[in-house]
Amino acid sequence: MEFSFSRRDIVRPLKQPTRLIQRTTEQTVLASWSHLQDQFDNLEKHTQWGIDVLEKYIKFVKERTEIELSYAKQLRNLSKKYQPKKNSKEEEEYRYTSTKAFLATLNEMNDYAGQHEVISENMTSLITGELTRYVQELKQERKSHFHDGRKAQQHIETCWKQLEASKRRFERDCKEADRAQQYFEKMDADINVTKADVEKARQQAQLRHQMAEDSKAEYCSTLQKFNSEQHDHYYTHIPNIFQKIQEMEERRIVRIGESMKTFADVDRQVIPIIGKCLDEITKAAESIDHKNDSQMVIEAFKSGFEPPGDVDFEDFTQPMKRTVSESSLSNSRGDGKSEPKFGGKSKGKLWPFIKKNKLSLKLGAGPEDFSNLPPEQRRKKLQQKVDELNRDIQKEMDQRDALTKMKDVYIKNPQMGDPASVDHRLAELGQNIEKLRLEVQKFEGWLAEVEGRLPMRTEQARRQSGLYEAQNTSAVNSCAQDRESPDGSYTEEQSQETEMKVPATDFDDEFDDEEPLPTIGTCKALYTFEGQNEGTISVAEGEMLYVIEEDKGDGWTRIRRNEDEEGYVPTSYVEVYLDKNAKGAMTYI
């Protein structure tokens, strides 16, 4: 029995349908990732790169939110830094339209900062938070798909190994069958070989041919199974897996695009509110009224004094005759003062409305009736005080009315409370109201006095106003007078501060010296002067008196009537005749 076969005859019939399937399905996969079945590793790297890009974008948005928060915080701190402090002089300055506009700008900037906080919050919730969760889901999905892909790859590799093993076994069995056939033919041709040996060789050849036929059948079965598995792998399993990976990647791309759109929308949503803030700033700027601010300056600093009169001519050709207008220095300079020297000791008379008042106010030494202020400013302060007291009275009366109603309720419904429990508080409120009313009457009296004087301010009142402050000043004010320089300016020099530490009250000591000052000349009263203020002396027209201290430039001269009566009179009210031989008279010679 003789037969021969080859491996090529077995494989050839199975290759035709495989090629046909490849040609028919190749056109359908060009639009998807299924034709990238041999690029599994590259697709794995590409999808990982896509996740890295998404995480990079998340980090970018997160840093943007931090910048927005930091910017908002800085804007709020800036707005708070320039806000006026409560109950301070700075708060009073914000009554002008320009400063009100600036305050409105600060408030709008605070709202502007709030919108940047909104941007940060929305980006955190709508982009950063959502994308962070999506990235975790994306990683899990990607891991699952590539796990399935590797599993399919391992399965086809296992099938290929089985096919290779079956093919090698079939090849080995074919070779063994050929050798057995050749051996049988050799034994059959040898006449020296026994018939039993020939039969044995023939049976062995047939056995080998049967084994080859079995290996051939097994190989054909394994090959058909592999081709089927391979077809399913490349045209079903892998395309499905790659399709899922492609859809996953496309969702990632769409998601990052939507996040970028949200990124812009978050900014766009606050633009109207930011625009409104800017419109309010523009509106505040347009509300600035320079005329109104100028008028407020007038109301804030108007003193109510009339301008000083003309300065009289001082004729030095006459023997030591000096006639200086009372308004020459005192009213024009507004800070005149006398610093007579008695035994090297500074003696100063205090004048109103000069820089000493700054020290008095700073040390809390301002009088209750605001007499240290110019008339117009005093009137405003008194009016403010009256209004404040009236508001306090109204509050107390409202509380009293409320307690009265409560007491009536208690009387009608004793179970709700004891009516006598509010009597003490009612009595206390009544006392407070009475005290406040007395205060109002007191300040209204001062206000009426100021308003009565303000329109009809006489020349004599202006002359006497110089010593009005002497009734309300203290030792602190005397120290402040000593700290003023000769030109009326206020100085902080250490050498002048030493004078403040002098315990003696110079103004009072001027009339308590044991040794009276020597006379340096005489004077004649040109007008009658009523010395109603402390430190002044009354004179009658035509009266002759002694001069003990000349005018130091403040418009006042110190005179003496007798050993017990001396004081200051306006220099313009007297005609002075200084003694040429007197001490201190050399200045006028």
Image: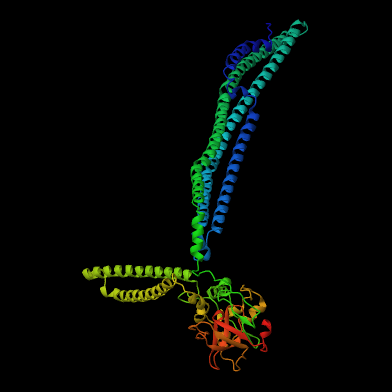
Q: Quadrant of the C terminus?
A: bottom right
In this view, 550 is above or below 16: below
Of residues 201 and 253, the one nearer the viewer is 253
Can residue 365 be seen here? The reply is no
Q: What residue is drawn where x is 57% and y is 37%?
A: 139
Residue in the image at 56% along x and 39% along y? 135
Q: Is residue 88 above or below residue 233?
A: below
**Residue 393: image x %, image y %?**
36, 70
Quarter of the rendering containing residue 369 = bottom left
Q: Eyeballing the image, is 485 above or below 144?
A: below
The foreground one among 382 and 503 is: 382
Residue 466 coordinates in the image, percent (x, y):
53, 77
Instruction: Tell me how the rendering is colored.
Output: rainbow
Looking at the picture, how far across and down is residue 509, in whole percent?
A: 57, 88
Quarter of the figure with the N terminus: top right
Give the image quarter of residue 21.
top right
Residue 379 x %, y %: 44, 70
User: At x 32% / y 69%, what residue is drawn?
Assistant: 397
User: Looking at this rendering, what residue extends furthest in the left direction?
Assistant: 412
Depth check: 456 or 274 in front? Answer: 456
